[in-house]
Image (cartoon, rainbow, N blue to C red):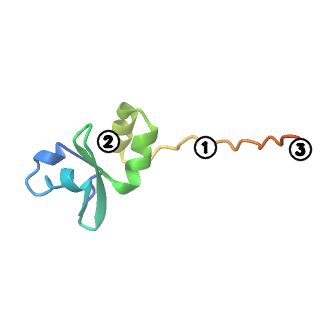
Amino acid sequence: MKAIVIAQASQQPYIGICHHSGGIPINGKQFLYIPYRDILIRQDWVKFYNSLPYEEFIKAVETGVKPELAKKSKKKKVELPSLF
């Protein structure tokens, strides 16, 4: 199965149970249920769903190409002077 997002997941006859368990495996791929949008997202795309605005996420899904995510910059630890 090449699906990345399955819309109206709770209304699908065989996978509607996913809204009770939070996700479901389909053909060896794990899908996570997002109740706010009533969609199933393949597990390897969840971080893109969480990082991108929804419209950009859907455009990436339509093309099938995972976008580059911005890398987090490491913060330097600020050493406080010793009180002793």
Residue carrying label 2? 62
Percent position of residue 1, x then y:
24, 60
Amino acid residing under circle 3: Ser
Residue 65, can we see it?
no
Q: Which mark is residue 71?
A: 1
Q: Is residue 69 left or right of residue 22?
A: right
Q: CA distance from mark 3 to mark 2?
A: 55 Å
Question: Quick one: which residue is furthest to the front in this view?
Answer: 84
Question: Quick one: which residue is furthest to the bottom in this view?
Answer: 28
Element on which disc 2 rests: helix
Element on which disc 1 rests: loop
Percent position of residue 57, x then y:
38, 38
Circle 1 or circle 2, nearest the eye = 1
Decide which of tag 1 and tag 3 comes sooner along the chain: 1
At 77% across and 44% down in the image, what residue appears? 77
**Location of residue 70 by image quarter:** top right
Percent position of residue 58, x then y:
33, 38
